[in-house]
Amino acid sequence: MNYMGIDHHKQYSFITLMDESGEVLRSERVANLRSEVEKFLSGVDDAKAVIEAGRSSYTMVDLLEDLGVEVAVAHPQEVKLIARAKIKTDKRDSKILAHLLRTDLIPEVYKRSQKNRGYQRVLRQRAFYVASLTRVRNRTRALLAQQSEEVQEQTLRVKNLFGSEGMKVLKSLSLPKEDKELIDALLKTYRHLDERRKETNVLVDKLYQEIPEARLIRTVPGFGVFLSVLVAVEIADINRFDNEGKLHSYTGVIPSTHSSGERSYHGKITKQGNRWLRWAAVEAVWPAVRSDFDLRCFYERLKKSKGGNSAKVATARRLLTIIYRMLKENRTYIAYKR
């Protein structure tokens, strides 16, 4: 068996090929093209590769697997902890990766399927449009805050400044010429982004119909179509978690722990893991508490003893536990009956 350590970049990768004894057979910079990778692999009968997880790493993963090479995806932060170096180069990094793979010391991450990654791109695109819309709204309000008191009073009368009625008010405002042009440009940008958001909503609705796990999660209080699809896609395969605690840890909603001798201290949540899944669980807390009696009692009880923030995080963990058990048992949520 031969081992390949790959230090991947957008345009090229530095690849080190090592045999079972640790001797470097080849080490060179290779363009991220199929023909170049095939040339590097010529004469290599049996090889396993490792690459750090990154934004564009999966393009190389797919290429190598298509060429018959088994690929492990390494956790970038944990690899750095194992192999710290004061001298850092592409050649050195690829060699260290190959050596760690040879000695079976690679901390692997879950390797997602091409279909699951396609789902993620749709959800990330919608999140991008929503975040951009928020920035445009904030910029518009910042400009309006610098206008006369009369203008501010007109905008405050409207319940939704960016709804149909609010748009009419914004267009009719009496503003200085330069500010009027700035507001008009922002409104054009807003309308364009809102159209793109609606288009991605259609794609998300299609994913909802395609993913059965999303329809199960939709029955949990607090989870609409988007959050249901997001959670289902980020979890991907519930069977990769042995218990709900592993899901909590993956989401990053468990308290940090500092232990020395006989003393242990539990601090704030780790916030390490899947930030999208963590955001979805916390985002669902308020609508879940408002709509479900059992969850509301759970939240209020903890709020009295531990405070609002701790109660919110604990409720997010409770929601993840519910989702874990539902997906494991393939059943919908059953609300508590008063």
Image (spheres, rainbow, N blue to C red):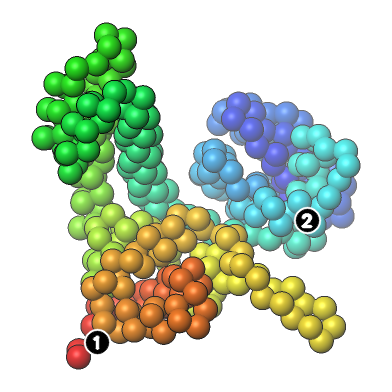
The residue indicated by pointer 2 is 81
Residue 264 occupies quadrant: bottom right
Q: Which of marks 2 and 1 is nearer the N terminus?
A: 2
Q: Where is residue 222 in the image (x, y as percent from the top left)?
A: 29, 67
Can residue 19 be seen by looking at this rendering? no
Q: Position of residue 319 (x, y in %)?
A: 38, 74
Of the residues shown, which amino acid type is indicated by label 2?
Answer: Leu
Q: Where is residue 46 in the image (x, y as percent from the top left)?
A: 68, 51
Q: Is residue 331 above or below residue 137?
A: below
Q: Nearer the viewer, residue 274 or 329?
A: 274
In the image, which disc is placed on residue 144? none
Q: Is residue 39 left or right of residue 281?
A: right
Question: Extreme front residue here?
Answer: 149
The residue indicated by pointer 1 is 336
Quarter of the image with the N terminus is: bottom right
Q: Which of 290 and 213 is in front in this view?
A: 290
User: Element type at marker 2?
Assistant: helix
User: Element type at marker 1?
Assistant: loop
Neighbour class for label 2 at 10 Å: few (<14), some, many (≥20)?
few
Q: Position of residue 131 (x, y in %)?
A: 38, 39
Quarter of the image with the C terminus is: bottom left
Q: Is residue 73 above or below residue 267?
A: above
Of the residues shown, which amino acid type is indicated by label 1?
Answer: Tyr
Residue visible at 80% across and 57% down in the picture: 82
Residue visible at 65% across and 37% down in the picture: 8
Question: Extreme top residue here?
Answer: 177
Q: Is residue 81 left or right of residue 129?
A: right
Residue visible at 26% across and 71% down in the picture: 290
Residue visible at 70% across and 39% down in the picture: 7
Q: In this view, does 328 lie to the left or right of 271?
A: left
